[in-house]
Image (cartoon, grey):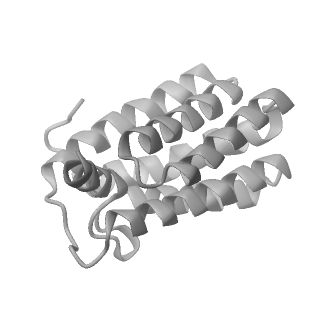
Amino acid sequence: MRFDGIAPEQVFAAQRALAPRLVRRATERLTPRILTAMDECVDRMERYIDQGPVFEAEARRFHDLLSRGAESPVLAILVAAVESVLDGLRDDVPVGDARRSPRTDRVEWNALHRKLQDALVAKDGDAASAATVALVDLMVPGASGNRRGVRGATRALSARTA
């Protein structure tokens, strides 16, 4: 999904606004069963940090569980729609800083998921929101000094390890 005439910064800002709201809502609603499943995702992300397809699948599963657990289908649809636009923007941005390894990006990505998971378990909405903003910034090329975006890094590693 793409929108002509909308500046990338506007899309990034929308994701930074919407995703933390969804996470804050999830903080109040996630069941122990969903939290356990999410924790398993983060564990597998760490275990398979060098295997792009497995790592990506677990990250997607984590976010799917989070979205369902928030019990807000409309907000989840909005976050997914903005994410879809971001995917298109990421595809248009060349993979950047070759000095950063894809593994380094994945380690950082996994650490932020662990922080988010810990905040969700503690039902700490502020910490969960902060971890979410940090994740969004890591995914977005150019945000907070990041010049690659995790998906670009993941594609680069997948190409090297395939």
Pick the front one: 109 or 9: 109
Residue at the spot 63% in from the left edge and 47% down from the top edge: 42
Position of the C terminus, as image quadrant, is top left
Q: How many marks?
A: 0
Q: In terms of image quadrants, where is residue 64?
A: top right
Snapshot quadrant of residue 34: top right
* Location of residue 136 with respect to 4 vertically, above or below: below
Query: What residue do we see at 51% from left, 57% from top?
Result: 135
When the figure is inspected, residue 108 is found, relative to residue 93, above or below; the finding is: below
Q: Position of residue 52 (x, y in %)?
A: 37, 46
**Taking 108 as reference, is 39 left or right?**
right
Residue 19, located in which quarter of the rendered image? top right
Question: Residue 51 at what x, y percent from top left?
Answer: 40, 47
Give the camera-side residue of 51 and 126: 51
Q: Residue at x 86, y 52 (%)?
A: 122
User: Which of the two residues, 75 or 34, is positioned nearer the viewer here?
Assistant: 34
Q: Is residue 25 visible?
A: no
- Report the side of 75 relative to 116 (left or right): left
Q: Is residue 44 above or below residue 100?
A: above
- Outermost residue to the top: 73
Q: Is residue 97 left or right of residue 19?
A: left
Q: Is residue 47 left or right of residue 129?
A: left
* Rendering coords of residue 98 (x, y %): 21, 73
Q: Position of residue 40 (x, y in %)?
A: 68, 39
Is residue 103 depicted above or below 120 in this figure?
A: below
The image quadrant where one finds the N terminus is top left
Evaluate whether residue 112 shows in this view: yes
